[in-house]
Amino acid sequence: MGGAGCSLTAPEVSVKSTDQNIMVGTVDSQPIVIPDEKGWEMLLEAPEIDTIPVSAMIYVYRRFCDEFPKFPGLRMGFVLAPTGKTWISMAVFWTGDRWQRVIVETVQCRRCLWRGTVAQTIRSGLYFGAANVEDAMKRARELPGLGCPQCGLTLLGHVIWINPEDLPASDAKV
Ligand SMILES: [Zn+2]
């Protein structure tokens, strides 16, 4: 009875970066893996890639499911932690010719109190693992920055994307 087929963990379950449902790209010369929808389902079953565990899986998955698929260019992926022992989630935005790492969060304009979800590019620690942090931040700052969609005030953190659903309607009374 204890013969073939008794292995508790089938190796097929483990997600590999070579799977067709995992896209491998680079962000600031650092490898990044970006699962597609099926890839996310696989990761929910087995939260590891190349036998390295994926961190913050539930949070990442919810966020991905709820928000990101609606927005072309915005993706959630994973980069290896400097220790190489865990995958850390990272939001990225496709600029047209490269992936830019971003933080997606809700912000409020200090002047007109507009509130919305944005992707911003300048934050301490965001560029961990980049081949050259200074260069990476310089490239980020060179992207067109967006101000408050309501009053034009500069938003903190060099915003490059604003959730279209949060843009004020042109005929709305404020
Ligand atoms: Zn404003």
Image: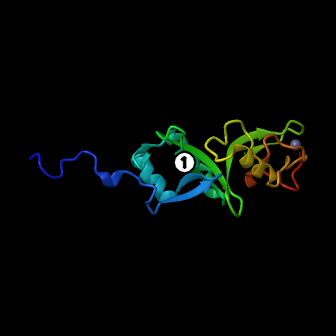
Above or below, 94 against 121 in this view is: below
The quarter of the picture where residue 120 lies is top right
Closer to the camera, 153 or 93?
93
Q: Quadrant of the C terminus?
A: top right
Q: Residue at x 71, y 59 (%)?
A: 95
Residue closest to the far front: 132
Side (left or right) of 17 relative to 10? right
Query: Which corner quadrant of the image does residue 155 belong to?
Result: top right
Specify the quadrant of the image occupied by residue 97: bottom right
Q: Give the residue drawn at x 11%, y 45%.
A: 2
Q: Residue at x 55, y 47 (%)?
A: 79
The quarter of the rendering in which ligand 1 is drawn is top right
Horizontal arrangement in the rendering, residue 84 relative to residue 70 (left or right): left
Q: Residue 38's x, y, as percent? A: 46, 58
Q: Position of residue 172 (x, y in %)?
A: 87, 52
Q: How many marks?
A: 1
Q: Is residue 54 visible?
A: yes
Q: Secondary structure at mark 1?
A: strand
Say which of 148 and 95 sits in front. Answer: 95
Q: Is residue 99 left or right of residue 1?
A: right
Location of mark 1 (residue): 78
In-front residue for pair 124/166: 124
- Image position of 25 with respect to 58: above or below: below
Q: Residue 131: x, y in percent?
A: 64, 47
Q: Locate residue 55, reporting x and y percent.
A: 50, 39
